Amino acid sequence: MTEGPQASTIMDLSTILLAGSCLVDSTAPNSAPHLKAVLLSRLAEYNKHLGRIERLQQSTTLDEAQLQTAEEALYVVEQVQNILAAGRDDTSVTEEAPAIGTRDLAHLRTLLQIIFKWGIDLLLPRVAAAWPSKPTSSDVIGVIDISSISGDYNRLSTLTSRLIRLVLPSDAQTALPLTLLTTVILNRHLPDLLNPCISLGWLPKSLASESMPTLDDVRPLVTRFLSMYVTRNL
């Protein structure tokens, strides 16, 4: 039997869901040394399923292993969202959009939790620590090494931009993609999503710098999203 476009889409969806399941394991130990080993093992298996050849350093810290897991979890969620949104846009009357099973949906919910817990919630406090709550002397500012957190800020900015584009993938005029993932994000993670968007998108000039610029691109997206969301709930 010849496989049509829909069969190909389902196969691609199945592949990314299987890879994503490697990042989810409810039986992981809680102790830091063991957790790091588990995360590195999960990442290795995940890369294997995607056909990647990447050597993970055993000297990687627990925080870095968590961040890498969060970044790959976001990659999985992005791919699934793209497939589901494309399926809704391109599906004809005689075809069905790609379906997500109960177990896969549970995995996706867990992946979203990982993105915020081990990505946003890990990076945002680090970055915020470099933002003084009130004016300080240059001597005090010098105590905080801004250059040491520029990498964290770049990763946080990237994660934040990618997250808001899960619900507004094109521009400020785009309608929200009507998928299960969009529903989960809005119902479970709306404050988690808006927190970094507002923190970085409305970062005052007095706190911004060349290494930590205000994330201007997310402002129109957040404004448009809030306008759409409030209107729907009036």
Image (tube, rainbow, N blue to C red):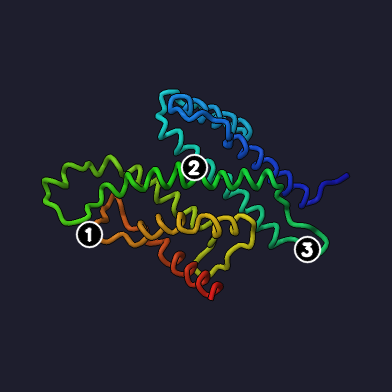
* Local secondary structure at mark 2: helix
The answer for how far apart the CA atoms under marks 2 and 1 are is: 30 Å
> At 14% from the left edge and 52% from the top edge, which residue is drawn?
136
Q: Is residue 195 left or right of residue 22?
A: left
Contact (CB < 8 A) between labels 1 and 3? no
* Local secondary structure at mark 1: loop
Contact (CB < 8 A) between labels 2 and 1? no
What amino acid is labelled 2 in the image? Glu
Residue most extreme to the right: 1
If the image is split into quadrants, where does the N terminus sit? top right
> At 57% from the left edge and 31% from the top edge, which residue is drawn?
27
* Local secondary structure at mark 3: loop
Residue 224: percent from the left, percent from the top?
48, 69
Mark 1 vs mark 3: in front = 1
Residue under numbered circle 2: 71
Neighbor class of circle 1 (other Cα within 10 Å; few <14, some 14-19, many 20+) is few
Q: Which mark is residue 206?
A: 1
Mark with earlier residue (2, 1): 2
What amino acid is labelled 1 in the image? Ser
Above/below status of 146 relative to 26 = below
Residue 226: percent from the left, percent from the top?
47, 68
Mark 3 vs mark 2: in front = 2
> At 21% from the left edge and 43% from the top edge, which residue is drawn?
144
Neighbor class of circle 2 (other Cα within 10 Å; few <14, some 14-19, many 20+) is many
Figure disc tally: 3
